[in-house]
Image (cartoon, grey):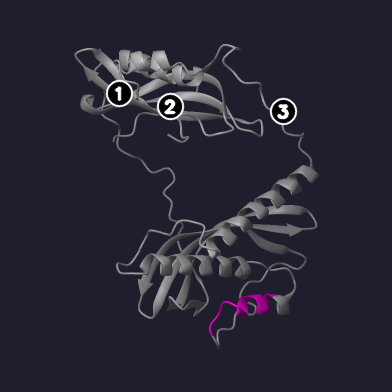
């Protein structure tokens, strides 16, 4: 599927009777609320780490080796690497405590004391840690882990940026152990990279396709099954509404991309999450051009089918 052009930002508000009551706005900003937000992020990503250690998260697919047990082994390797790197990046002035925490993950003889040094009076910790790749190497496994770090000093919290490290592990199904100090790695992102332009839709077809796609999104928001059936040419399209807890605020225009045999539109939907902040949501609409005109085959706003 080719990527459609950028979704327009202009959004037309829906009629009041369509919209749910807006959520209460978040409290006004202050130092206390900023601290609470940081602590909330720490709690959330702590749960993610615990979930990984308990096998609640889906396995890391990159570099999965064929064979029985390979997926489970890679999942355990990713969980160990994430938990280790969180401790590795934590510097709070307690050198002995840090050495003990790291010792639970490292092989005999691996000493990491003084491996991370912060300015006097500064505490560092990672508020987000996630494995991005698992790959087999001679002697074990290497896991690339991304971490966002924060520093805290007398002046408050400072953003330490996002770092990538490769954590070398040894072991297998019976257990994983860190066999050497982690090494820095490039971030696996390519921000600003140019991508190919989508295939243009014939000028005579584009307006009709955009109009039908927008009508389909409005029908989904309004729960209008009859309109959806008509837009589907007598057959209701597959619909994935907004996720639970999200409420539509307004529907904007649509951008359509080809090829003609596989049309797709992105309709700008303004939606509000439970916390009261609204977001621009690109709703994907699959279309079909035929003798009866343009019909809708699928509307995907990100929620369950």
Rendered image quadrant of residue 90: bottom right
Residue sitting nearer the eye, 192 or 95:
95
Q: CA distance from mark 1 to mark 2?
A: 17 Å
Residue where numbered disc 3 is placed: 24
209 within the magenta span: no
Can you say whether 84 is above or below 205 in the image?
below
104 within the magenta span: yes
Can you say whether 224 is above or below 93 in the image?
above
Q: Is residue 215 visible to us here? A: no
Can you say whether 17 is above or below 95 in the image?
above
Residue lying at 46% horizontally and 36% vertically, measured from the top left: 304
Q: Is residue 100 visible to us here? A: yes
Is 32 positioned to the left or the right of 41 in the image? right
Q: Tell which circle, 3 or 2, labels the residue nearer the N-terminal end.
A: 2
* Mark 2 residue element: loop
Residue lying at 42% horizontally and 66% vertically, measured from the top left: 72
Q: CA distance from mark 3 to mark 2?
A: 28 Å
Q: Tell which circle, 1 or 2, labels the residue nearer the N-terminal end.
A: 2
Overall secondary structure of the magenta section = helix
Residue where numbered disc 1 is placed: 287
């Amino acid at each position: 599927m080719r990527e459609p052009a950028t979704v327009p930002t202009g959004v037309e508000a829906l009629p009041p009777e369509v919209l749910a009551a807006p959520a209460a706005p978040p409290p006004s900003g202050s130092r206390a609320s900023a601290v609470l937000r940081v602590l909330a992020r720490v709690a959330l990503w702590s749960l993610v780490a615990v979930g990984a250690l308990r096998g609640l998260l889906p396995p890391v697919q990159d570099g999965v080796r064929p064979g029985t047990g390979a997926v489970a082994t890679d999942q355990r390797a990713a969980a160990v690497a994430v938990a280790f790197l969180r401790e590795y990046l934590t510097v709070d002035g307690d050198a002995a405590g840090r050495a003990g925490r790291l010792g639970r993950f490292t092989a005999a003889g691996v000493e990491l004391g003084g491996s991370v040094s912060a300015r006097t009076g500064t505490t560092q910790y990672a508020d987000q840690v996630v494995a991005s790749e698992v790959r087999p190497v001679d002697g074990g496994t290497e896991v690339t882990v991304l971490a966002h770090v924060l520093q805290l000093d007398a002046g408050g919290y400072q953003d330490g940026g996002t770092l990538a490290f490769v954590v070398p592990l040894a072991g297998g199904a019976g257990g994983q152990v860190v066999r050497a100090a982690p090494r820095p790695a490039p971030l696996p992102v390519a921000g600003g990279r140019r991508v190919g332009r989508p295939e243009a839709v014939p000028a005579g077809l584009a307006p009709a396709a955009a109009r039908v796609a927008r009508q389909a999104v409005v029908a989904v928001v309004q729960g209008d099954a009859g309109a959806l059936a008509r837009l589907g040419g007598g057959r209701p399209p597959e619909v994935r509404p907004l996720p639970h807890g999200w409420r539509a605020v307004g529907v904007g225009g649509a951008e359509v991309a080809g090829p003609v045999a596989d049309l797709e539109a992105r309709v700008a939907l303004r939606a509000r999450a439970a916390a009261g902040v609204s977001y621009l949501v690109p709703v994907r609409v699959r279309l079909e051009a035929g003798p009866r005109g343009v019909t809708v085959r699928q509307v995907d706003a990100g929620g369950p089918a």
